[in-house]
Amino acid sequence: MSDEMEAAPDCDPYLLAQVREAFGRVVYSHKTHEKQADICFRHHRLQHAALIVLTAIGSGTFLAAVVGALGKPVVTSVATSFIALLVTAMSLGAKTFKFEEESDAHRGIASRLWDVRESYISLIADLMSGTASDAQARKRRDELQQATRDAYTDAPRTSPKAFERASEGLQRNQEMTFTSHEIDLFLPEALRLGQDEGGS
């Protein structure tokens, strides 16, 4: 807290600490939704690639030519039926598991959270430079909290895998807990409080 008071002596240090913590949470949420969108899009690509391959293999003429060359019509019939079953299952799966739509939804939330994240950076800059009064900063903070809440209300759920990838991407392992040093790593250099490594 003393570092925050030294960095921005004219603003409420508790307000600055709260805004920085909220900023850190938004950074994590934004990155997690980005990672979840990537995961969903990869599933979408794999789903469609598998459907294309199975449909091509399952085309009766090709399969009959390959398997029929062995001279066993029963094997040809069973193989054709099995591939047709897989194609049907994949087609139903594509209608049930809409990975592309889910990916787009996560990207949309990430975009909204990016805007909130950047606005928090601006608020932190205004607090630390003294250009925003505490009253103005509290009003802006409340608006950003509402924008974040609105984004979370519309957000699809993310997976532990996405959160893990976000942690790796942000070079962190502790969920939603931030030291001042860790938040400094997210901020432009001019807005950092300049603590030693590890926040001590």
Image (spheres, helix red, strand yellow):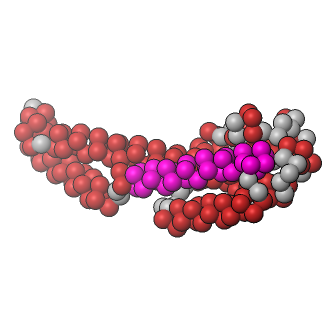
Q: Is residue 21 visible?
A: no
Which span of residues is magenta-colored? Answer: 102-131
Front one among 116 and 55: 116
The residue located at (53%, 57%) in the rendering is: 158
Residue located 72% across and 45% down the image? 125
Q: Nearest the camera: 128 or 121?
A: 128
Q: Is residue 94 magenta?
A: no
The answer to whether residue 89 is above or below residue 56 is below
Residue in the image at 32% along x and 47% along y:
47
Residue 188 image point, x, y percent:
69, 36
Q: Residue at point 59% right, 61% down?
A: 148
Residue 49 visible in rendering? yes
Residue 61 rendering spot, x and y as whole percentages: 7, 39
Residue 108 placement, left or right of 151: left
Tell me if residue 111 is in the magenta stretch.
yes
Residues 32 and 26: in front is: 26
Q: Magenta span: helix, strand or loop, mainly?
A: helix
Residue 52 placement, left or right of 105: left
